[in-house]
Amino acid sequence: MSQHAPAPALQTSPRETLVKVEQLTRRFGAQTVVDSVDFEVQRGEVLGFLGPNGAGKTTTMRMITGNLAPSAGRITINGLDILDQPKAAKAEIGYLPEQPPVYRELTVDEYLRFCARLNRIVRRRVVQAVASAKERCGLGEVGARLIGNLSKGYQQRVGIAQAIIHSPAVVVLDEPTVGLDPIQIREIRHLIRELGGEHSVILSTHILPEVQAICDRVQIINRGCLVMSDTIEALTRRGETADLRLRLVRPPQAEEIRAAIPGIARVEECDDGAFLLRPADGGANTGTTAEQVAQIAVEQGWGLCELTPERRSLEQIFVDITTGDVDSGSDTETVA
């Protein structure tokens, strides 16, 4: 009977790191605006970069794109040190600032040809590069139109097209959906997700639902320091609590509810008439479950109409971290 060697296990190769930031620091005089920041962004990843005003987010973005020299630290773009090889490294970056750098008096085709030349695309490839950027950004039917006559959403598309026309490894987008209507926002978000398939995308935004809709990972900078870096999935789990939201047809006083349900430390009445049940020790040792609460509500004749777990939103997590309501040191969790 012949012996067969076991089939080798399939190995998943690690994703390529396209952005690597090490101990990045920037000082303005005696003030340290960015303090020893470390993170990486991989190919195929969309990173949401958040921070309150004055936190150092914009300064960090300017250093990553090569518009501001760091006081200390290192930035590597697709393996190229941005200080040692600035031209080569910057050629691997596509950048869309908050105000798209478009010339309103040019047509879309004229402007994108101009951008192709600025990015040193050889003449024989300009037509192909313009056509590819237009196709990816949904601009195929507006090539002959003046940019100034386009809607804000289409102008944003033109701005993204100029950022990717040279097929950079890294795309940096600063507030790409500000001022757009809901339909335009949905279209731009879809476009950004598609870009994330081939590039590393760094998305700076103040719109927190946008981070959840687009990004694979989110990081928060506060007072110059990176205080959180986590995947969206882990961030969702972070928002889970042991608290329960209870709504009753015939509600008693909050204190009566607390006394009737074992393991509940506090009952808070919400503005909409519901109650928030907070278990003792965060529910770790009390064993209070939604099933038990529902059974007691029925036995007491309260008339149960809602019983749901309470979750913290991304906005609540963001506020907690940036206002010091949580221990940011223990919450920082770098995910490579």
Image: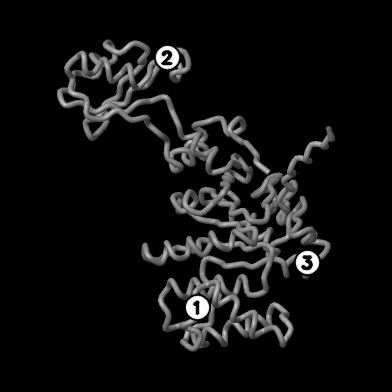
Does residue 238 lie above or below 206 as drawn? above
> What residue is at 66 percent from the left and 49 percent from the top?
34
**Nearer mark to the viewer, of 3 and 2:** 2
**Nearer mark to the viewer, of 3 and 1:** 1
Does residue 12 lie above or below 272 as drawn? below
Does residue 304 lie above or below 257 as drawn? below
Label 1 packing within 10 angstroms: few (<14), some (14-19), many (20+): many
Residue carrying label 1: 139
Q: Nearer the viewer, residue 39 or 57?
A: 39
- Going by the numbered disc 1, the residue's amino acid type is Leu
Tell me if 53 is positioned left or right of 64 in this view.
left
Residue carrying label 3: 86
Mark 1 or mark 2: whose residue is earlier in sequence:
1
Mark 3 or mark 2: whose residue is earlier in sequence:
3
> What residue is at 38 percent from the left and 16 percent from the top?
288
> What residue is at 49 percent from the left and 88 percent from the top?
144
- Going by the numbered disc 2, the residue's amino acid type is Gly
Residue carrying label 2: 287
In percent of width and height, residue 31 lies at 66, 48
Toward which corner of the image does residue 126 lie, by quadrant?
bottom right
Taking the view exactly as shown, the residue that stands out farthest to the front is 1
Toward which corner of the image does residue 225 lie, by quadrant?
top right
Label 2 packing within 10 angstroms: few (<14), some (14-19), many (20+): few
In percent of width and height, residue 36 lies at 71, 44
- Going by the numbered disc 3, the residue's amino acid type is Pro
